[in-house]
Image: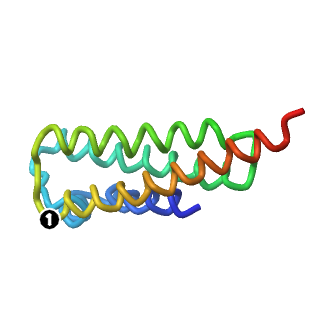
Amino acid sequence: MLVAVVHALPLVGVLGAGKLLQLYGVPVQDPGLELLLRHRAVLFGLLAALLGYAALHPPLHRVALAAGLVSVVSFLGLWWSTGTNNAALARVAQVDGVALALLVVAAVAHLRVGAASAP
């Protein structure tokens, strides 16, 4: 559920360039870029909904864990590889690092529960 909350936070970016600047510390002056980033915010909302719903429905644990891991690992990898380092993006990387740790703990717990219930 905590990782669902982390992924829901960027949903405010759908409100426009001002919110995107607050989130990421990057001014968005191009209308096309603003559209893409606002759409990205909607996709984060969808991922947050999946993560939250799956937390309460064990058959969806694997797919939600995989989606969450792809999300945070891809951002962290891209952030690290580009060397982009403003304060807001560094904060996003820190939060994603915590989310990654939570997802790893959840994945281990899921695997242990699955192994314990296996015949």
Report the quarter where the C terminus lies.
top right
Residue drawn at (23%, 58%), measured in percent from left and top? 20
The colour mode here is rainbow
Local crowd size for mark 1, using a 10 Å CA cut-off: few (<14), some (14–19), many (≥20): few
- Label 1 element class: helix
In the rendered image, residue 106, in percent from the top left (x then y), is placed at 59, 52
Residue drawn at (61%, 55%), measured in percent from left and top? 52
**111 up-or-down from 49: above or below:** above
Image position of 106 (left or right of 23): right
Residue at far top of view? 119
Q: Which residue is mark 1?
A: 87
In the rendered image, residue 38, in percent from the top left (x then y), is placed at 31, 48
Which amino acid type is shown beneath numbered disc 1?
Answer: Ala
Report the quarter where the N terminus lies.
bottom right
In the rendered image, residue 104, in percent from the top left (x then y), is placed at 51, 49
Number of dots carrying numbers: 1
The part of the image, by quadrant, that contains residue 88 is bottom left
In this orientation, which residue lies closer to the viewer: 47 or 58? 58
Residue drawn at (11%, 59%), measured in percent from left and top? 86
**21 up-or-down from 42: above or below:** below
In this orientation, which residue lies closer to the viewer: 114 or 76? 114
Residue at far right of view? 119
The part of the image, by quadrant, that contains residue 32 is top left
Image position of 51 (left or right of 70): right
